Image (cartoon, coloured by chain):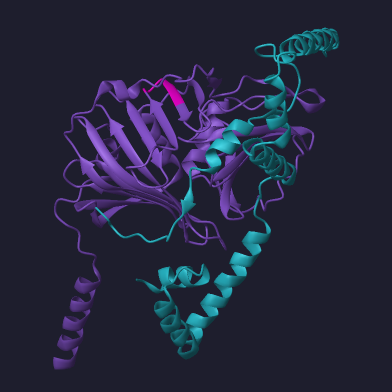
Chain colours: A cyan, B purple
Amino acid sequence: MKDEELLSDYVDGRLAPAANAAFEARLKAEPALARRARALKALKGALSRSAPPMPADLKAALKREARAADSRRRRSPWLDSLRAALAAPWAYGAGAAAFAAVGVMFALHYEARRNAIVPGQIGDGIRNQDYHDLDAAEGLRGVWSEDNGSDNDEG
Amino acid sequence: MRAKLAAALMLAAVSSSARPRVPKNMPEADALLARAFAFPEAGCVARGRIQFFRRDEKPKGLGTVVYTLPDGRLRREIHPRGPSKPAALVIVDDGREQTLHIPKPDRFWTGRMERESAAVAIARLKSIYEISVSTGGRVAKRRTWRLDFRAPNGPLRRTFWVDRESGLLLKTETYRYDGAVARRERLLRLETPAAVEPGLFALTASSGAAAKPLIPPDRLVSFDVPVRFPRWSPLGFLALDARGANRGVNIFYSDGAANYSVFEGPTDADSGLNEKLGREVRLKDGSSARLLPAGDGAALVRRSAAGTLFVVGDLADEELVHVADSLGAAR
């Protein structure tokens, strides 16, 4: 491995322990190499300070969604109570009445929203609103896993 | 006299040993690129790995199984826990339409994502890099040629390893401006010709879930700011978020590890970057832009009388340019 590659891996903390120890020994013996390592570390620090991170509000929204997804996955005690109540004979009538009430409320809410549309829509007629795809955020999160970073040809 | 003769012999020896050894059959970069961008002439199945490196973080990786047909159809499965386990993401691309399926929680995205011709892709690479060919090592047990892509008079930005025999692109690396590897994609095992079932290239929603558009429709976002989504994005990236920011609009893309964002706003929008760094490139619409370092990643900045465009994140330089080109003319 060339010195440039070693330096880069050393600064990134990607050298194996033995290689790291050997390289640190070289740094003590070779002032020029040590200077280059210091410069690379300083550059790394400067660049990481100017890195464009994921917007904080998006990160917060994704965390909220992850927490919500977790809580959805957990079985709620009230759901069990509801299931038990639905087993009772009177539950069907009460359920139908509740369903009708929710339907009326939804229709009223939808009508109010339809009348409050802001003019100026473009494209396919979608109204002005921020765009979030939380399905994509949630789905892509499970795609990657930790890696040892090696470049071994396993073929 | 004897001393002069010895010095002349030494000089001759040094110059001949310093001269790089160029194999007689070393191909030209153009020919190598043309082969690398062509699809295999027979069905192909390949197992590979993609690694992503971010400063001060542990590397991330995923396993891939790629199927291709000679007509340009491609299917890429992502297997985080090994190829025998179910895929966490499946992408099918027939050259015109692309479909992306995340089995859990069974979501589809589909849309027109036109693949540009090899000639256009190669022309873009040649317009933004200095390209050199050398001998590569073995990748997937195959001997390779190595193509280095450098910023003109600047650092190494990308490397391709191309199979000497088949011309297949076996491995790529993208580098940060400090020289460290940012992303590595490589094939580990390759079978071609292979019998590839054409049914693999038809992805349909198993649960009847409606597919979302891969490229969301242009719209107005907060404060009635118009947003237009790029018509091209690298394979596996999805738009997660778009909102008004700094009197413009910012769209955030991710593939789960790497991120990038596209900002369009007023002419005086601040990028927070040192725009004197980097180099100038010409976009498809004839406008001029700059490619420059941005933290761990890279950025493309275009400033025109019509407005400002920033494409910033963990993409290779030609991908930044491709995203910008897909947006069309400055506005």
Q: Position of residue B80 (x, y in %)?
A: 42, 46
Using the image, determine if residue B240 lies above or below residue B291. above
Q: How many marks?
A: 0
Q: Is residue B12 left or right of residue B67?
A: left
Q: Which residues are magenta?
A: B94-99
Q: Is residue B220 left or right of residue B323?
A: right
Q: Residue at x 48, y 47 (%)?
A: A144
- Residue A58 falls inside the magenta stretch: no
Q: Residue at x 54, y 46 (%)?
A: B258
| Residue B231 in sight in this render | yes
Q: Nearer the viewer, residue B259 or B247?
A: B259
Using the image, determine if residue B153 lies above or below residue B269. below
| Residue B150 in sight in this render | no
Q: Nearer the viewer, residue B78 or B139?
A: B78
Q: Nearer the viewer, residue B21 or A133?
A: A133
Q: Position of residue B318 (x, y in %)?
A: 47, 41
- Residue B97 falls inside the magenta stretch: yes
Q: Is residue A136 left or right of residue A56?
A: left
Q: Position of residue A81 (x, y in %)?
A: 72, 30
Q: Residue at x 20, y 86 (%)?
A: B7
Location of the N terminus of chain A by quadrant is: bottom left
Using the image, determine if residue B112 lies above or below residue B139. above
Q: Nearer the viewer, residue B103 or B254?
A: B103
Q: Is residue B262 left or right of residue B117?
A: right
